[in-house]
Image (tube, rainbow, N blue to C red):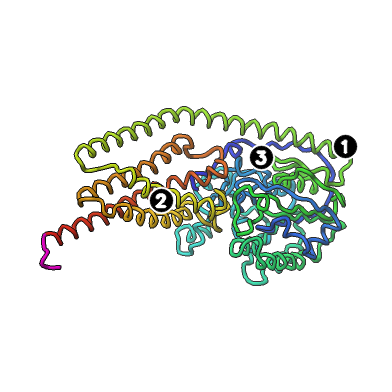
Amino acid sequence: MWDLEQTTPALAKVAPALPDPHTPRLARRVFVVIVDGLRLDRSYELPFLDELRRRGVDTEAQSHYPTWSRPNYVSILTGVPPTASGVRTNHHSTPVALDSLMDRARAAGLHAASATDYDVLPKLFLRPRDPAHAAETQDLDIDAMEDPFSAEAVRAPDAPLASPFDDARYAPWPGGFPEAGAQVAAGNDELVVMLVGAVDAAGHAHGGDSPQYREATEIADRALARALARVDLTQDAIVITADHGHTGRGGHGGLEPEVLTVPLIMAGAGVKPGATSLDAHLIDVAPTVAALLGIPAPGHGLGRTLTELLQLDEGAANARVIADEQRLTMTRGVLAGAQAQAEVAVLEQRALRIGMVIGGALLAAALAYLLVRRHVMKFDWRVLLVSVPAFFIVYYALIGTLGQRFSPSLLPAQGHLAATMAKYGLAAMVVQLAASMWALRNQGSLAERLAKANAIAWTGLMLAMIPAGLVWAFFPPPYVSVPSPVWLVMIPAVEVAVACAAVDVALTLLVELIIFAARAWHRDHPAME
């Protein structure tokens, strides 16, 4: 999981492209609201959201893979998707060195505020007070401060860092979010970012099809109604979306339609009532909000301005499109160069790594041949066909079923794929051990039985290690490109399989040694029976 993260992606190494389209400001203030985990179909029949839909835009947007929270907070506020931002999972723990909506607002002399019940949002965009010390943020662990006794927490009060928000309200206590939201709404900050996490928590705990999830959406809707009650939609605009949805059983990260499709609701000044968009993505939110405020879009972004949703005349709309194209020419060029370099590096190492895997397999085969010649290992194919497949059939069947068809959406909140795989591996180990004991029963002498157990151990370990070696050869970390959903599950799965196979080998041989010793002792001491 940590190999997926990039502290300094290619875009962060270049200055942002900031063509200014000089279009008129459409809204006095813009409220960007992220309802964490709200999938599209569950966002309807909510009084406040439906009222905004009636007064403005009711459309949808596509989240970005991997569809986890931190990656798509960044997508929304910078216009950079996870593949390019370097923020690929919820384990990303360093500030994001990409141009953001907050940076553009403050550069234009505007002010930014936030209200959230999840403290990671402002921490993700911390900036060094002195640009000369920007490298210091690359080693900063924003999650380490959750332990109040850690060295990072002790040093935090005097850290040379600045918040991206002029006014940042973090209110995790009951009733805190609408109170904090109402306070920033009553202020004068031109850009306000709100994040509410109750819906996502319910999705993970009970699933997107559960009544508890529905109740959480209603609670969030009422909280937003209270927080935004005094917003003047004749002068200000509200943009509501989500970072991802949830599967029916709960979970996200993959490309399931219910995970990928989220609401995009806009209402107020500058918004064209009744308009829709056929291909909106979360990376389009940042340039669209920038257009509402009349400022350049974040300069590292890969999204476009959703001009079809805004009250722009033809000239202003064309100016935004041209500015987007100029920015995209730079950002796409940087990414293409980084991708080409990464592919060359992978190809240079792949042949060597494949050779190492093949060499290791041949060496293991030679060792097995010597052990067979010395009668230490004996291959009985009937025994092998019963015992060896047991682990792999159970293990991968559990991943495919409980793991929602080999999708990273199996991952629990703030979890780790390898830890989840280990649970499936433990169950498969128990089945494999039982199958081995059953297959080895009545197998001649004790020495012969132990030799067959050695063959089971060698075969199982080889069947686990060779795929892991090939994965290591074809998908070497760190990952400039993010593996597909299936491979994002399979890479840790085959690695965990090696660990489980090694433990299973030890357990199988330990049981056989105990049986061997016990029977030998009874044979030598028949009077004790």
The residue wearing badge 1 is: 315
The residue wearing badge 3 is: 300
Q: Residues within 10 Å of mark 2 (few under 14, many from 20)?
A: many
> Identity of the amino acid at label 2?
Ala
Question: Which numbered circle lies on residue 390?
Answer: 2
> Identity of the amino acid at label 3?
His
For the point 22% across and 50% down, the residue is 444
The segment highlighted magenta reads 524-529
Q: Is residue 154 above or below residue 382?
A: below
Number of numbered discs overlaid on the protein picture: 3
Q: Earlier in the sequence, mark 3 or mark 2?
A: 3
> Disc 3, disc 1: CB below 8 Å?
no
For the point 37% across and 45% down, the residue is 385
Q: Quadrant of residue 167?
A: bottom right
Q: Secondary structure at mark 3?
A: loop
**Residues at marks 1 and 2, CA–CA distance in whole angstroms:** 67 Å
**Residues at marks 3 and 2, CA–CA distance in whole angstroms:** 50 Å
Chief secondary structure of the magenta span?
Answer: helix
